Image (cartoon, helix red, strand yellow):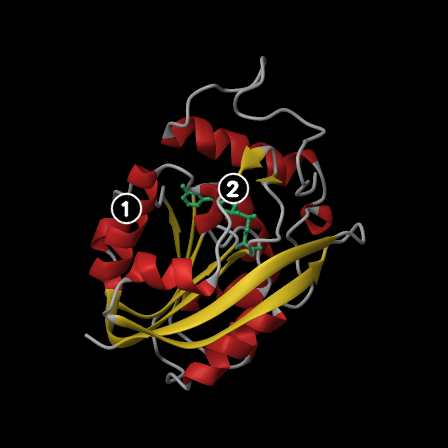
Amino acid sequence: MSCQTNKESSCSLTDKGCKTSNSTENLAEYWCGKYTDVDYKTLGWYEEEATPSIDLILETNVAKNAVIFNVGAGSTTLIDSLLEKGYTNLIANDISSCALKNIKKRIGEEQQKVEFIVDDLVNPTLLNDIQKVDVWNDRAVLHFFTDKKDQDTYFDLLHQKVKKNGYVILSEFNLDGATMCSGLPVKRYDETMLQNKLGNDYKLLKSFNHDYTMPNGEVRKYVYTLFQRVN
Ligand SMILES: C[S@@+](CC[C@H](N)C(=O)[O-])C[C@H]1O[C@@H](n2cnc3c(N)ncnc32)[C@H](O)[C@@H]1O
């Protein structure tokens, strides 16, 4: 399964035979299917090395025991890389436990340095109770929230959880990016749109476009942004 531009070769949430409601349970099942139908290393967003994200986290210069929160972490190798670099206080969230299982399997005993939280970012329960974080990192998650209500819930959680002087990294499809991913429509962004979503309490430190080459060789266009909370 891959992120495709305007069509999808497998079922989407609105197709017959697929779930038609975006409830947490149905979304969790939907995403679990993505991670179990194929080898996750062939998924359209899989990175051998999460290079732009790790570079931005290193640029923040946060301490090794800083709380780094990966939202919608999926099966990302970013967690492995952060552990290798000595970070000891990681939180990995996803709506799909199937996705997070792949990380747990890879990192083995290092799991003690990672809190895994299966929860829905746009209908949070467990996430409401997490500690405040030094870094909020999102790659290819926010762009799935096409309803304003879901976006508002996402940013409410972010405002509640990011410490003053903490950092926010949002990496989403850019305005030339795909309009669908994994059978779902996406909202594309540029740095100004993300700044508007975050508001004046966040200062843009860096942004750049990045062409990501999928495992099947196709290219997906992202915008990477690094903000710091100033108020
Ligand atoms: C395109 S994947 C990106 C995964 C990972 N961030 C990466 O870069 O490899 C999107 C991820 O968001 C997760 N996701 C989708 N909707 C979510 C929600 N409402 N709450 C939490 N996670 C969600 C999916 O399960 C999936 O793992």
Whether the residues at callouts 2 and 1 have beta carbons within 8 Å, the answer is no
Which quarter of the figure has residue 168? bottom left
In the picture, the quarter occupied by the N terminus is top right
Q: How many marks?
A: 2
SS at mark 1 in the image: helix
Where, by quadrant of the figure, is residue 229 drawn? Answer: bottom left
Q: As displayed, is residue 25 above or below residue 89?
A: above
Q: CA distance from mark 2 to mark 1?
A: 16 Å
Q: Is residue 118 above or below residue 176?
A: above
Q: Amino acid at mark 2?
A: Val
Task: Say which element carries label 2.
Answer: loop
Residue marked by disc 1: 152
Q: Residue at x 51, y 49 (%)?
A: 188
Numbered tag placed on residue 186 in the rendering? 2
Q: Amino acid at mark 1?
A: Asp
Q: Is residue 38 above or below residue 168?
A: above
- Front residue of 74/210: it is 210
What is the quadrant of the C terminus in the image?
bottom left
When the figure is inspected, residue 228 is found, relative to residue 161, above or below; the finding is below
The x and y percentages for residue 3 are: 66, 43
Given residues 173 and 73, the one toward you in this image is: 173
Residue 115 locus on image (x, y percent): 38, 59
N-terminal-most mark, 2 or 1: 1
Is 119 or 191 nearer to us in this picture? 191
Residue at (58%, 13%) from the top-left corner?
Answer: 16
